[in-house]
Image (tube, rainbow, N blue to C red):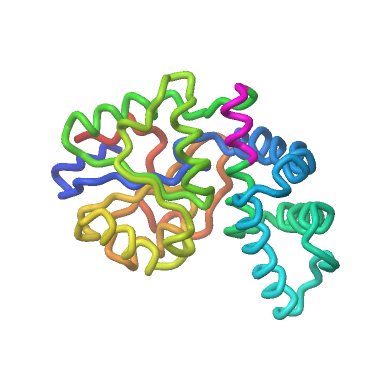
Amino acid sequence: MTVRLGERGAGCVLLDIEGTTTPISFVHEVLFRFAREHLDDFLRAERDSPELRDVVHRLTTEHAEDVARGESPPAREDEGPAWVAAYVRWLMDRDRKSPGLKLLQGRIWERGYLAGQLRGQVFPDVPDAIRRWREGGIDVAIYSSGSELAQRRLFESTEHSDLTPFITAFFDTAVGAKVSAGSYATIARALGRHPSSILFVSDVTAELSAARDAGLQVLLSLRPGNAVQPGADEFETVKSFEAIHV
């Protein structure tokens, strides 16, 4: 299938990361593993930093919310590294889209990127597509559950060079959950665009449904390693960005 953005009146492509621009294996086997392995060292090294205090404040609030819902996260006896590490691992084990967790992971990954221990990974067709869209007057934006900081570090450190100059905006769950239509309405307002002029590409049908409810155009990303999605037959699909033309 060939998608022509001009014919559809789309002036912006909004991209998910995991399973869309970037292999799921990189996120789970490289990034998540790195954050888990370096968690304790990071908490010790940054214990008195303002950035970590902000993260701990967020996690403390989320912990209280988990308890109020009747869940059983690790008990909080203080706000020291041991408790934070235990709660963060509990969140990781459940693959929570926790704002506090995502912010912390982003800080850990930043250290890895800056030290040369991590390098962003994207599918081979992504760099050329992003450049082609931008040269054709199409804006490119990113929306991921990972923090905006983590998104920027990933795209600026790929083997294809720094891709961030071609990306108009980055959005994380500070705008709302990815399965909420309101999040996409917020993004459209931030971009100064009518929702119908934005094409959202993701590997998750629940996200596509929410975006469609907000008035965005949507495509289901079918990449190697992606999970089979419920209701996939309701959506147009794309296997490579080579199929998306200006």
Question: What range is drawn magenta here?
Answer: 108-116
Task: Classify 184 as above or below 218.
Answer: below
Q: Is residue 22 left or right of residue 65?
A: left
The residue at 28%/27% (across/down) is: 131
Residue 23 among magenta residues: no
Residue 31 percent across, percent down from the top left: 64, 37
Classify the position of the N terminus by image quarter: top left
Q: Is residue 198 left or right of residue 119?
A: left
Residue 224 percent across, percent down from the top left: 54, 34
Q: Is residue 122 left or right of residue 237?
A: right
Between 201 and 131, the residue placed more toward the observer is 131
Q: Is residue 19 visible?
A: no
Q: Is residue 66 left or right of residue 130?
A: right
Q: Is residue 145 visible?
A: yes
The residue at 19%/35% (across/down) is: 246
Between 114 and 210, the residue placed more toward the observer is 114
Residue 112 among magenta residues: yes
